[in-house]
Amino acid sequence: MADLGRAALVVTLGLVVYALVAGAVAAITNRRRLAASARNALFCAFGSTAVASAVLAVALVRHDFTFQYVAAHTNRTLSTPYALSAFWGGQEGSLLLWLLVLTGYGALAVALNRSLLRDLIVWVVPVIGGIATFFAFMLVAVASPFTTQTATVDGAGLTPSLQNPYMVAHPPMLYLGYVGLAIPFAFAAGAMLSGRTDERWIVATRRWTLAAWAFLGFGQLLGAHWAYVEVGWGGYYAWDPVENAALMPWLAATAFLHSVMIQERKGMLKVWNMVLVALAFELSVFGTFLTRSGVVNSIHSFSKSPIGAWFLAFVVISSLFSLALIMWRLPLLKARTKLESPLSREAAFLYNNLLLVALCLTVLWGVLFPIVTQVVKGETRTIGRPYYDFFLRSFGLPLLLLMGIGPLIAWRKTSLRTLGRTMLWPGLVALACGVLLVVAGAGSSRPGLIAYTFSAFVLATIVLELVRGTRATGSLVALVARNRRRYGGYVVHAAVVLLAIGIAGSSAYASSAESRLTPGQSVSLAGYTLTLRGVERRSVPNAIETRAVLDVKGPWSGTLSSGDNQYLHPPEPSREIGLKTNWATAEDLYVIADSANPKTQVVFVKVLVKPLVNLIWIAGIVFLLGSAIALWPDAREQRRLATRLALLRA
Amino acid sequence: MSTRSPARLVVALGVAAVLSIFLLYTAVAGHSTPTLTPSQLGHHTGKLAVVGVVVAPVRGDSHAASGLRFGLRNIDGKSGVVRVVYHGENPPPLFKVGRNVVVSGNYQHGRLAGDNVVTKCPSKYTASKQS
Amino acid sequence: MTGIAIALGIAIAAGAVLLVAWPFLREPVAADDRLDALAPEEQERLQLVEERDRVLAALKELEFDHRTGKIGDSDYRSQVGPLRREAATALRRLDRYRTPMTAFETPELPEEPAPPPDEGTPPQPAPVPEPYPPPEVDIPTPQE
């Protein structure tokens, strides 16, 4: 069976190389049948990659330990969902997933657009073929998932902390995001190669970009939630290089989503958009490189692997290619209109872009710093949390404010007086909230207070927009249905605001206490008193569970237990936290029990109270809702496109 | 209204503002911690982090006054052993002899007084045997 | 097992070769092998349609923003005139391409200009006193 998988991958490699070469020749020499042939090659590549993926999936489910990959990442006790999740749990399998999603997306994007964007698609095919060639080559020659061995009795198994629904969903979500960014990149490259640098490529890839961005964002939240409940250090984001690897392309994609709106309406920022889409794509491949190469120390990253060098080469070559393309087509990328006023929606989008890209580059610098210092000084230095926190506040808080101002500002230009008038009510609401918050004691953290006040401002703005719009159109549903993109965007903004409030609350206003406890002793924090009842140990299938049981009295009363599990297959320990979400007071009570000893009945307990942290997870749901609204197909838009299509077929 | 587009001015000012925040930070508070392997420690002292593999014996308890005591060696094995005394929360569950870790703390007189330990997840992405 | 694998492998490879060669198998001798690119005239017409849609969308958005109070009266007045003239120009240029043969074109145009991509349609246009005379050119109402 492994032979079939290997053969399928070789076929894929052949097909994508053909798509690249034949596609490029067809585009240059203007040959219709060759172009169609190259397109078919791309469609077939998806098919053969799907076959290879099926082979691996079947091997995983059947616990076929003649596959080295299956033996390294699963064992017999693993249930089917987790055995399947091992598909993307290792190097080779995750590369296969990359290729599967890439060929799938590519085939779909080309198929959907081949009539309307003929001269563009003919170039998009070789670009996607080129990207796919790299991954197919890696899978065939460097990191094959189909290496075989004499079957071992059992496999190495999956780390218990990864056996968790969030960890099953997190990587595929991220991949749908990472790879999804290749589509707008390919269309942008196609636009430049074909000379069709108008807005058509943007309109065609708008939903692709939005979907990829939504998957990437939601995937990160899934990972953060897993870290919070499973890894159990009390936080959800550690500014680890691999976490940042997903954040950076997401920030670039956010900037891109906004700036394309300007190009669509005003024909401005054409060069900037090309740069941004290339940046987003390169960062997503770079992120893949970071995760695999062992080049920076990270809790996630893994030993040095030769694959890193290949990835780096790909990033460098594709970046140079994009740069060359942009320089060559610079004359075609002239703006149609100019920015008329620093007080206009165009300008607001521009500030938004500057801040987002600044934050993105700041994070990139933090990630690269150890490598740079190693090369320059011969000594690795790492940048810590305070750096990231500082810049998140410096750039994030103004961004938060802009989310509120942007929708209120008109296109082209507005006067300070008009702006002041539209901002009056939200501003007053924000001020009132600020005062109330200070009275309620939130003045203890200035950044926190600012974040809350700005959030109130933005929420008030969104409500105001909805109210005004409803008054003008008569019904909220009709308003949203007719302006899906705009109001879907507002819902997404609301999600970001919830996220900001959740982050501010759980970091700026969190409290913690640590204590060594014996039965009967207690520790108090934020109105809660936790008394140790005792330390218990029991055996369950495949694990020995040790728990410190605590009685809690306070805004919530009950029992919490926390401790650790010692698993048997594979023999790995894991930390188990005690968590109680108190919806009434909107806070989490979080207990980490350390060194729980059932013999001595001693345990070291760390208690955390994290206000509003659950808003972060709620924000994830709202985020999906907003994205869905913005992505929803629009009947009128479809009709318009159909008309244009008919026009072309005349 | 001036005929010259304020776009350039806006962009220039924006970039300048961003850069100045950045420069201000790095000038005032640019902490970065040296992250060294045991063989690179040499004459360094003070706040730093050490990357290495945990070597036996591992004794003691991080909560006790005498701390958790263990050794660190280069991941490639080519170095002597650095003695570490770690105080604080229990190290992460994956901590054990043979594991790659990053210990941060204060290095004085040839000993690292650690206050934070980060373990790496067991290799998901090691090179497969044939490459 | 290996027998099936080999057979499947061959089938996949053969299928791929067939599909890739299909365009050539279907038309061994092609009368016109040039890419179905748009003729320059079609290209321009498409561009004009896109231009018209863009300007009309901007106009609708301007009116919506004014109606919801985002733009003041004076700002609205100063912007709506040039935009309406732009719209008129775009429609006029598009009109030149209309021939009896292409009567199917722009079927979705209702009594008022085509709805823009994604803005709400105000129930009626906001009445604004126009201090200047209206543009000379009639915005043609499609009637065929």
Image (cartoon, rainbow, N blue to C red):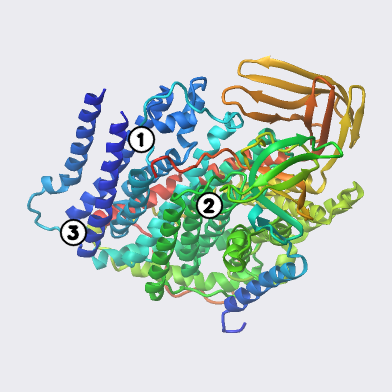
Across and down, in percent, residue A388 comes to: 69, 57
Q: How many other residues sit within 10 Å of disc 3, few (<14), some (14-19) or many (≥20)?
A: some
Q: Secondary structure at mark 1?
A: loop
Which amino acid type is marked by label 3?
Answer: Arg
- Outermost residue on the front side: it is B80
**Nearest to N terminus: mark 2 or mark 1:** 1
Q: Mark 2 and mark 3 in contact? Answer it, CB < 8 Å.
A: no
Could you tell me which quadrant the N terminus of chain C lies in? top left
Q: Which residue is mark 1?
A: A146
Where A412 sits versus A74, above or below?
A: below
Q: Residue A124 — which label?
A: none
Let me know if residue A490 appears in the view.
yes
Across and down, in percent, residue C29 comes to: 7, 53
**Nearest to N terminus: mark 2 or mark 3:** 3
Q: Which residue is mark 2?
A: A290
Q: Secondary structure at mark 2?
A: helix
Check chain identity for marks 3 and 1: say if they share one. Answer: yes
Across and down, in percent, residue C80 comes to: 55, 69
